[in-house]
Amino acid sequence: PPHYRTHTRGSRELRRLVSTASTHFMSETAPKRISTAQDSEDSLSRAKKPRTNIENAAMTAAGEIDEDLHSRQLAVYGRESFRRLAGASVLVCGLKGLGAEIAKNVILAGVKSVTLQDCSACELSDLGAQFYLTEGDVGKNRAEACAARLSELNPAVEVLVVTEPVTVELCAKHRVVVCTETDYDTAVEINAACRDAGAAFIRGDVRGIFGSLFCDFGAEFDVLDVDGEEPHSCIIASVSNETTPMVTCVDDDRVELQDGQRVIFTETRGMTELNACVGGYVIKDVKAHSFKLQGVDTTDFSPYTGGGIATQIKEQKKLAFKTLAHATAEPGEFLLSDFAKFDRGPVLHLGFTALERFVKSKGGSFPTPGCPDDAAAIVAIANEINASAPADQKLEDVDPNAVVTTLAKTAKGYVSPMAAMFGGVIGQEVIKAITGKFHPLHQFFYFDSMESLPKPEVLTVEECAPEGSRYDAQIACFGKTLQRAIENKKAFLVGAGALGCEFIKNFALMGLACGEDGGEVTVTDDDVIEKSNLSRQFLFRDWNIGQAKSLCATNAARAINQNLNARSLENRVSPDTEDVFDDSFWKSLDVVVNALDNVKARLYVDSRCVYFAKPLLESGTLGTKCNTQMVVPNVTENYGASRDPPEKSAPMCTLHSFPHNIDHCLTWARSEFEGLFEKSPGEANAFLAKPQEYADAARRAGDASARENLEKVSECLLDSRCETYEQCVSWARIRFQEAFHDKIAQLTYTFPEDAVTSTGSAFWSAPKRFPTALTFATSDASHLALMRAMANLKAEVHGVARPEWSGDDAALAAAIENVHVHKFEPKSGVRIETDPKATETASLGGMDDDAIIDALLQKLETVREKFSPDYRLTAVEFEKDDDSNFHMDAICGLSNMRARNYQVQEVDKLKAKLIAGRIIPAIATTTAMATGLVCLELYKIFNDAPIEAYRNTFANLALPLFAMAEPIAPKTFKFNDMRWTLWDRWVLKGDLTVKELLGWFEAKGLTAYSVSCGQSLIYNTIFPKHKERMDKKVSDLVQTVAKLDIPEGRKHFDIVVACEDNEGEDVDVPLVSIEFR
């Protein structure tokens, strides 16, 4: 599958584990609908003010989608599913922590309405997991107390409150009913009412560090899209004429299809009979670059001559669900969550059933936390149930590893990470029930994190007894001792986006850094809030747009828990900010939590955590997929221990002359945009700012790069400088002619359709597509839309005011008709790059770069004299999320014209934004689940848990799939009686000379032959002159030779020492630190 590590919030686990789960990432297949003129007309942006919340709500009511707000969600769900969401009503019963999480996620998803139902009053202990309740709400109805705050999440969603018990009539008003904190008998009745009303029913609960989930979507439920992935496709190279035909594909990419899937053929030449089968063909024997067709005989078909695309048919699926009463007795298979807990599902099913009966027998009271007598009673009930169960459901042991006992002892507890994790899972099931998008849970899911708990002997009744605080529900699971420790920890949260908001919310609820003994959370993020953030970064509101994320997130978290000791910074964590995040800062930390969206930053933070031996909790999301990775000093490998291979990119010649999918067209379009409107004006400004220095530097360089830069300057200031809007229109029209007619006509003149290669094979063979030059027409709305966008951007570059008529199609068309376009005449001898390995455009062979540079500089100096000294162009930096700036109109128009040249299916502006804007699909449900999983690991960090307790997770809510496994231990290096890992650092004390340093290694049986600091060699045996340094202080050499600046407050510096043993074999030793002060 494609590698997402470079661009996404995920890491290598996202790729490594997804293959084991037999699922695939999105392919680069073009959409299967041809864009129309109406599409282009609809996508035409007019200058407008940002929409208000009231306007957004009105759009939703009118069936429109605010793509600026929901672009990341649309990348996951698509428009049709999003419209289904906007018409659905959801009932959430029970507004403790889990209910609030579900309601939050569903409201952010954009349903029509959410009804909050709860008959109970808020208790102080609810504040340990319910983030929209405060101490002032204690005694108030839970639903009424949090409704206003939930409604702020999405003003387009109506939030209603019901404080009476659930009725049949209430169920009938909703598409989905979610029950939490609902006893079994009541849940069975509500389930029956939902069946009668045709509503989906979901029941979920968290009991301490255990959770349960049940779904019933009816006797017949249609899954419209099982996994949400784009249909895979492959370009055909050949098809054989035989009874079981072999289809061979071009070797640019592996075939991502699977045996048993169906494909349809399009654009196949020669064997056109393949194109005629609407229902498609079943495939088998799938290999890396081929597959066979099942049930079709092509012996009598016309011979294959070329072309063709095989595209997967996404087939729907029907599911039959049992009711809760029926499924409880006959549960079937359980969704597995942990590879180390294959038999856990049946045990927890029995345990939760026994717990229900115990609670019912006690009039609704849960077992006393930590009480062995209550636990024994529940185990006894489990034994009774098991004894009467059918033979095929009987368990040999109802309480293996004290699972049911632990459930009983912690069931009264309620912790925010479990609520967040299950809130994400259940929220996604609600969306599946409404849209039919993705495969629902069928039907039970149980989960536990027993490994998060302290040792069993610690959790006595006294240790877990309530103390009358907001943390009582967490103390019921983890005890007072761990609670006090959590309150005084120091944590570093790197990033305050979607993940960061969820993390700091969980921190505030858990009480992390909420004590009075030095606890603190430092939050840093150098980004500001944008409108598109509001659909998933739930701590932000529209009045926060433009403000710092870190500041707003910490302020919002303090509103959840006023005792949170949080410090917000706006610094990027990088080598440039080591004066801010210095040694003393890193040494003071207890844990680091990453909430980042790029690999480079992750690797840097990882390196700091390794250096200072600090735990790092890593996570990432991509649509419905998420991964978590635990990095624990001296216990696990680090994040950077393995790297993904570099992401594959299209060859330069493919982008410039031979695109064969819409991604190629969009990549080319964005490159054109940046070259025309950002890089060229920027280069011109560099010349205008310091013309003499610029000219001197260009003459000194005298190469093709300097010439190309000067040509950019010349293009802006000489060839296409515009002073009127009409000139901008003329430039846009001529640019269209050059890009989509003249260059294509030259290409087909140089390589006609029947051209052959030097080996005699067809030049225009797959994957190349023979292009057609476009003829401009003002009657084509897409042509007109592109002209408007290009002219407006050109006007912005040159500071030209847009006249009122620029938005009028007729006036714009009239202006375009007045543009004189030269007739194109093809040229002979033009070189067009065809080598896929080439990285630069074809050079102007034989031309004198120096002469061209001198000529251009003379012309530029002449024209510069006409400008005022402060004259500058406006370099337009690409911004995908501003619908009024014409950026995406230009890129979408450019890519679609190029697609039209090469008969590639076009895309609308949203799809273009997702690809060209490199938008990462993101939804609130996945984010909540990921952060819940990570925070469950946080307890383990504070418990000093062994490696077998930790879990790295890959999950995909679309399938649904959970793949949890122990982390990998760090690699151990050995030499004689010494052992070390990447976590070790050898510290030498004293202001040592080189001779003393080498002697230290010699005493350990090692020969140090090279010492370096940064990029500089301090000592190496191959250089005779380095012997003169033997008596010099290493501290002096690193400062004089390596130019290392050692701050006054730093007592040490680091060096890398290369060693070998007595036999001359290299030995990798740890980083060496010398404490010289």
Image: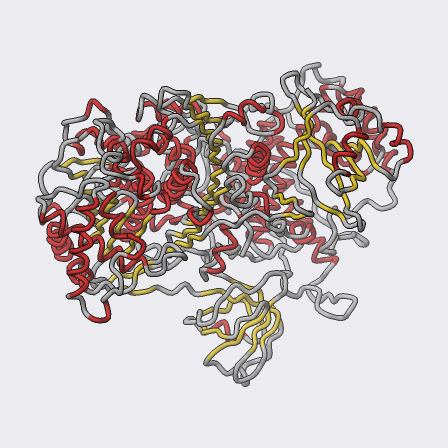
Whether residue 268 sits left or right of residue 866 in the image: it is left
Whether residue 238 sits left or right of residue 280 in the image: it is right
Q: Residue at x 25, y 52 (%)?
A: 404
Q: Nearer the viewer, residue 517 or 838?
A: 517
Q: Check the image and report above or below for 308 versus 8.
A: below
Q: Residue at x 76, y 66 (%)?
A: 757
Q: Check the image and report above or below for 687 versus 709.
A: above
Whether residue 520 sits left or right of residue 998 in the image: it is left
Residue 535 falls in image quadrant:
top left
Q: Check the image and report above or below for 191 versus 472.
A: below
- Residue 779, visible in the rendered structure: no
Q: Position of residue 175 (x, y in %)?
A: 21, 49
Q: Residue at x 24, y 57 (%)?
A: 349
Q: Nearer the viewer, residue 400 or 812?
A: 400
Q: Residue reaching furthest right?
A: 1024
How many discs appear?
A: 0
Pick the quarter of the image with the C terminus.
Answer: top right
Applied colour scheme: secondary structure
Q: Position of residue 162 (x, y in %)?
A: 13, 37
Q: Nearer the viewer, residue 344 or 420?
A: 344
Residue 581 falls in image quadrant:
top right
Q: Position of residue 126 (x, y in %)?
A: 22, 33
Q: Check the image and report above or below for 808 versus 898.
A: above
Q: Nearer the viewer, residue 679 or 351?
A: 351
Whether residue 680 sits left or right of residue 1031 in the image: it is left
Q: Position of residue 491 (x, y in %)?
A: 45, 29
- Residue 946, visible in the rendered structure: yes
